[in-house]
Amino acid sequence: MTRIKAQSGSSLEEAFIRFLMDTLPLSWELERSGSREQHADQGYDAVITGPDGNQILVVAKASPRVTPASIPRTADQLRHAREALEDRPKASVMTVLVSNFISKRSRELLEAAGIGWYDPTGNVRVEAERPSLFISQSGADQDPNPDTDNRRQKSLKGPGAARVVRALLDGAPDTRVRPLAEYAGVGAATSARVLGYLAQERLVERDTHATVRHVHKRSLAHAWARDYGLTRTNHATAVLAPRGLGWVMNQLDEQQLPHVLTGSAALRRYLPESASAVAPLSLLSVYSEAVPLLQRELQLRSAERGANVLLLEPFDQAVLQRAQEGSGLRYAAPSQTVVDLLTSPGRGTEEAAQLMEILAEDDEEWAL
């Protein structure tokens, strides 16, 4: 990745104003301050005037480096700035955070707080009601100017992170560093690093004793799905079952073959009787540490096209942890099923959303 020189706060504000000037239609006007002094006593940095004469007061806060953990404080500051200006006639207020890079998780938190954003990589979202304005575009998903001196956890890749994430999604009974490490099957150092990263990303909330009090499970599942993929993380073999998926599932039971079903088949295990899956079962995803045995005993054929079974050699025991039994078959835990569906082909994301809605009925953290 090309390393880009980070800009100062004033340079970032200047870049954002230039972006607005280049992007707004010719019938719109933007009055910029040039320096903050012009509007400093009024609490805003620029004024956009629409064709109807209504105005947008732009409040831009520049911060060279942003993390999800810093968003709540920034959101409070911008919210207070907006409230101080909202009584102006014929004007709406647009609050925007400007930084060198704004991660996907930070953007999610900003959107939830009703705050726009801009970074020089091209991540932009600004919105105002009157006059109606909406600009949105996507840029980099990774920081082009990373902090190379920071040795902390930087992603959820790898077995250690997977085990800690699964433990949290599965409701570990004790979320202090060492008990969580024991429950997850990792070292205390790994547990501490991953928890620190999750707190930084605002995916968990910890108290003053570093005990996790709240897990944003839906957001955490999506975050893990960005670093983990059903077929790219595990070794996947696509095959054809000529006798159909029902026959395969019967044989897994009758022959007691080593397996853990995930994806669409596992979704059906966790749906209430009154609910129907959002998509038909067309692909059977099966974890197994004996893939050649399954291919031989189930008479599965290699298939470049038309495959209806996906055999998966687990990259780590994390994906098999806390699997559940049902009618002679084994199924991946609901949390693993969610993330596998999020990274599955076809309508997997819709099926994942359906399962998360079911889980949220009994556990409100799955709604976060």
Image (cartoon, rainbow, N blue to C red):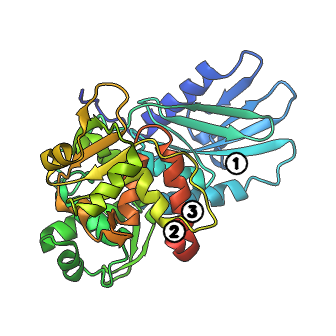
Q: Nearer the viewer, mark 3 or mark 1?
A: 3
Q: CA distance from mark 3 to mark 1?
A: 45 Å
In this rendered view, identify the residue nearer to me: 25 or 233: 233
Kindly identify the residue that appears in the image at 55 percent across and 24 percent down: 18
Identify the residue under disc 1: 42
Identify the residue under disc 3: 357
Q: Quadrant of residue 308?
A: top left
Disc tally is: 3
Local secondary structure at mark 3: helix
Which label sits on residue 152? none
Query: Residue 168 location in percent, x, y?
Result: 34, 71
Q: Which quarter of the rendered picture does the N terminus lie within?
A: top left
Query: Residue 219 location in percent, x, y?
Result: 45, 58
Going by the image, does 225 lie left or right of 98?
A: left
Mark 2 or 1, nearer chain start: 1
Kindly identify the residue that appears in the image at 48 percent across and 34 percent down: 123
Local secondary structure at mark 2: helix
Going by the image, does 61 lie left or right of 312?
A: right
Callout 1 amino acid: Gln
Identify the residue under disc 2: 359
Kindly identify the residue that appears in the image at 28 percent across and 36 percent down: 238
Name, please, the residue furthest toward the top: 26
Local secondary structure at mark 1: loop
Q: CA distance from mark 2 to mark 1?
A: 48 Å
In this rendered view, identify the residue nearer to me: 135 or 356: 356
Callout 3 amino acid: Glu
Q: Nearer the viewer, mark 2 or mark 1?
A: 2
* Above or below for 251 versus 134: below
Going by the image, does 194 lie left or right of 189?
A: right
> Can you see residue 298?
yes
Q: Are marks 3 and 2 in contact (CB under 8 Å)?
A: yes
Callout 2 amino acid: Leu
